[in-house]
Image (cartoon, rainbow, N blue to C red):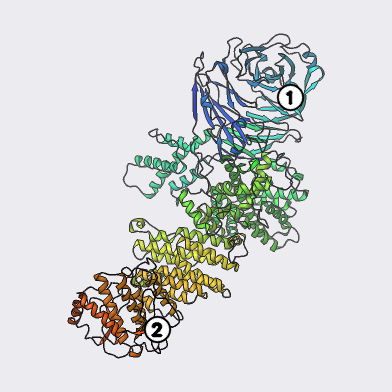
Amino acid sequence: MAAGLAERSCLELGPAARAPPRRWREVAFSPPGTSPLPLGRYGDSAGGFCYRECAQLGAATRNRFVRWMTSGDTLELVEESLDNELLNNAVRLRIQGCPLLPGGVHICEVQSHLVVLLVTVQSVHRVVLPHPACSYRSELLMESQIQSVFTDIGKINFRDPANYYLIPNVPGLASNSVASAAWLSSEGEALFALPSATGGIFVIKLPPHDVPGTVSVVELKQSSVVQRFLTGWMPTAIRGDCGPSDLPVSLSVHCLDHDAFVFALCQDHKLRMWSYKDQMCLMVADLLEFVPVSRDLRLAAGTGHRLRLAFSQSLGLYLGVYMHAPKRGQFCVFQLVSTESNRYSLDHISSLFSSQETLVDFALTSAEIWALWHNEENQTVVKYINFEQNVAGQWNQVFVQPLPEEEVTVRHDQDPRETYLEYLFMPGRFTNAAIQKALQIFSQGTERHMDLTWDELKKEVTLAVENEFQGSVTEYECSPEEFWQLQVEFWSKFYACCLQYQEALSRPLALHLNPYTSMVCLLKKGSLSFFVPCSLVDHLYLLSNEHLLMEDDAAILDDLEMSRDVVCLVQCLRLIGESISMEMAFIMEMACSRLQPPEKAAEQILEDLIANDTDNVMEEIHSKLQEIRNPIHAIGVLIREMDYETDADMERAHPLNMRLNLTQLYGSGTAVSVVCWGVCKIATIRFLICRDLLILQQLLLRLGDPVVLGGGQLFQSQQDLLHRTSPLLLSYYLIRWASQCLASDVPVDTLESNLQHLSVLELADTTALTTHKLVSSPQTIVELFFREVARKHIVSRLFLQPNASLAETSLNWPHLITAIVADFLPLLWPSNPGFLFPECLMGSCQYTQLQEYIRLLQPWCHVNMGSCCFMMGRCYLVMGEGHKVRRLSPASTGGLGTPPVMGAGNISLELCLFWAKSRTGGEQCDRLLGWLLWAGAGTGSAVSLVWQAGPVPQRARTSCFLVCFQALDCFCQAASEVGREEFLDRLIQPEEGEMVSTPRLQYYNKVLRLLDMVGLPELVIQLASLAIMESADDWRSQATLRTCIFKHHLDLGHNSEAYVALTQNPDPSRQLDCLRQLVVVLCERSQLQDLVEFPYVNLHNEVVGIIESHARAVDLMTHNYYELLYAFHIYRHNYRKAGTVMFEYGMRLGREVRTLRGLQKQGNCFLAAINCLRLIRPEYAWIVQPASGAVVGNAGLATKLLSSWLQGRLELYLREGASKILSNATSRGVWSSPTLLVPSPSCHCPFLEPGQLGGGRWHTQETAAGLLSVRLARCCGLTQLAAQHHTAVRSPSPPPSGMGERNEKVKPVS
């Protein structure tokens, strides 16, 4: 590229405000001594003021300015900031009955105050406000919201005589001139220069606001005789004749240290300069000497002339004069030159001509002129020119924001309501204020709509149009075609109202030029817009044909021949773009939206162009192509200019310099909307360029002309360019879509919950995952991203570079806005390795938008594929979270019409079957498995089948769980890209002190945490099972994963699967922990049969120890761990240990539970112990006798035969009143049974009371004595831990453990 275009066209960026109309602070007063005058005499006017330090990075007034608009006797003042949101920044001041002069608002700045000087037709006023630099401490400027300079305007006494003055009748204000000027003297006096009724100028001087004094009026009508010799002209003022020809039509003031020069452009086409201090006319210049004069112009009064001043410390004072003539105009630029003896003259710099008819306003700098016109069609025209460098006098175009289309095309297959609503509420088209005004008129004033949000306004518009439609339809029946036509009629009527008010509010009033930052704004009736430079490609594509032909080739590329090729190529693209109809353009739009190849759409459009070519456009394009020396190279140059793909991601943001308040730079809603709307405009233009370029390449392939393609060009090169252009078009389509996609309003608690879920990923501390601030209007997802993430990155790159002196840095709007947009686009570019944009959407709960973004991205973008899969998985989790599914009820799901939309791809059949087995049973499972088999054919088939079967709640649950399994599928696909993508690499960074494993295992660990946090144990189990295959050589990771699988199987009630996972755990300590948890949980659930029947290979002693420790630590009357342990030993035929357990249970009951119920249980325990001892050989029928207060010892354990002892205890028990129980048992025939009655571990009732024997469930085993109503109780939670000591007396020759303890055929106890 060339060093850079010295002058390029500009774009107007003025996005339509979606916020409700601003709330004005109303202030009204009537100056004493005035009489009401009609208000329609003067038109509306506008202007602006810039603070002197607005370009300094460390200033309190950085990037702040004031704009104003007058209409009749009302003045609207608004302070704007590009950095902070200003509170109380809009004031509507009404001077009742006193219309303001157009341009009669002048704002001056002193060290401690901001002074607003106002000129009406009857009075002048001074409003003194505290300066922002004195109002706020510097550290407060780091806040996103600060107070405006107008915050305290309500405290001002506008009727204070010291701050207003009535214009005297003599000399009186000229009735046919609206010129005025006002300034502050170095002593703080307020001065107002006005045209007098008799010709000439008079000046009203108010004393300083804080010093008592009187008002003086001075008339400037005397002139120095010496001035005649200085200028060579004889002004009428020198002769003492101040006739109407001297009447100023435009006034300007240039302030000096102790004087002020008042410049007056008069009706006689002369420019006069007065010294206020000396009250002398120092210079008179006849401007007709610099204009091609005709007799008519010399005789006509110059009422349309305009005067502007521009001062530069290095260049001095410049004067810009617009000389108005019918159907033409001329700008003359002069420099004020000072000679000896206080003599002045004008040095003519440039004369510039314009053919525009009506000049609205113009602004002057020391190098440029910006002009605003209305052409014959009443359209806005803005141009600028550099009068120092542009010798040819060629104006640069400013491409202003066009008004919305006059008509909306509704196809017959579209719903008129949806089409019009989409067009009306598309971001950037209509303002909230315009739609509200149209709604007010359309509703015929029956209801006043104020302060409606964007969504509320949309509902009100729909309701108003539908009510109007329903009220006008008299027939009860009509055909679909008639109904459609009536809808179009009423919606088009409302659209016309909106268009009318949008046009009125978009009427331009003035230009505002900031000389310190070079920022140029367009002030409109109801809004504000900014001008930004065009990039080279956009500049060439948007230029008109005549300007494109006049473009300097040397300013485009260093290679002049290549520059000519590029210009010819752009001309071909413009010819194609102008020939494409709305239907053809729709083909490409639909192809991008439906993920179809753009090359095919371009080929179809080309065929339509050739078929409908009535103006021989194809021949003209072919002729232009023959002028291109190397079309392949020219296309490559154009593609490179539009491609923002980078090799590496942009640097991470560094901490911003707080002292210089960079944290809020360009952080206001105004700046955010301007930058993001600029990105949207660029994406829209580039999309059209790429579309036309694709069509042109298809034409080149079709022609196949070696003369056109250049010698030696290969077909492969053409195909490569075609495949480079297609992703480029899709990238800009995606950015344009994101720039117009509104973000969803998310409640704060939902955002906090989302961040809590994502905190397990350890991404919550990154800049992309921050809770976004509340804004006054709905923002697009690109605005959300720029506000919260991208702006900080860009500012850090621009201002925190090495060797950058921030204190000396001055803000330049054209350079900065260009750099910001240029740095912002790579952050949005889909094929760049950076993944901040989707990450920001995830952190801000914009999952619907994120899902659509990835849908549009995945088929063609092969960068960050794993990261996109992870994001899509997260979207699926949010769309079908398990806890949401469990809360579904018939009432909450009855209104569901269609299943949730899911992305492309198939659900794993294994996952579906696993879910079916874990969630359903019986007939439901059979029916569900039937359609789950269709999962192999695609997600859509499975969802459709489930939606047709079963009740609505079941369908909703099924669909949500299918979404969750699709999430798992996405997470598994993303695992293959771990270690290759920046986002996934940040995701797997280990915590401090965390065991480092392989990258993929770290990734699985993070996803497992996320699934666990969301509450989807089925997915945790499946993913952990996959992760185990990755950890074959890492036993620690395997232990962690097996523990995870065990935990979630246990939570789901999959007891057998939990036991299997426990036994496969390679870590003994974790295995023991899992075993302990299994025992406790199954006891709490009363699932004792599973607990007893598990084989416990190599874990038998551990299980017994766990149950024993719980039995000895809890309350005997609440928990029945002894009975569980008894059943555990009986199930394994270990009767001696079972008897030992029941004996210990009975002993503790005798000591700790001294009640009748405790005595009954004690008897049952002893009977069970006797039966167990009778079931084994007598020499082994012994147990250890517990005794309180004994010392525990592992060596020298002694035993004692218990038959006689137990018999004595039993007799004592019978004597104390338990005989009734035994007699009852005998009468029922329990004791005479030849079989052993073992209680079923699945019984959940406590011991039966007398009279309840035989009421439980019993299993018959081998021959043995009956056992008295020993039932298993429900095991509850553990209570307290009590120490239990045992003494033991060793019996002679005890048998080895486990021998002689099995069942033997012996007689039952009597």
Question: In the image, residue 322 lies at what x, y percent?
Answer: 68, 26
Visible in this render: residue 834? yes
Quadrant in the picture for residue 813: top right
| Above or below, comparing residue 749 to residue 1176 in the picture | above
The residue that label 1 is drawn on is 292
SS at mark 2? loop
| Above or below, comparing residue 856 to residue 932 in the picture | above
The residue that label 2 is drawn on is 1198
Is residue 92 shown left or right of residue 1162? right
Question: In the image, residue 817 lies at what x, y percent?
Answer: 65, 42
Residue sitting nearer the eye, 297 or 1045? 1045
Identified by mark 1, the residue type is Pro
Question: In the image, residue 20 lies at what x, y percent?
Answer: 48, 38
| Above or below, comparing residue 1068 to residue 871 in the picture | below
Q: Residue at x 40, y 86 (%)?
A: 1298
How many angstroms separate mark 2 from mark 1 (CA)?
134 Å
Identified by mark 2, the residue type is Ala
Visible in this render: residue 936? no
Residue sitting nearer the eye, 821 or 476? 821
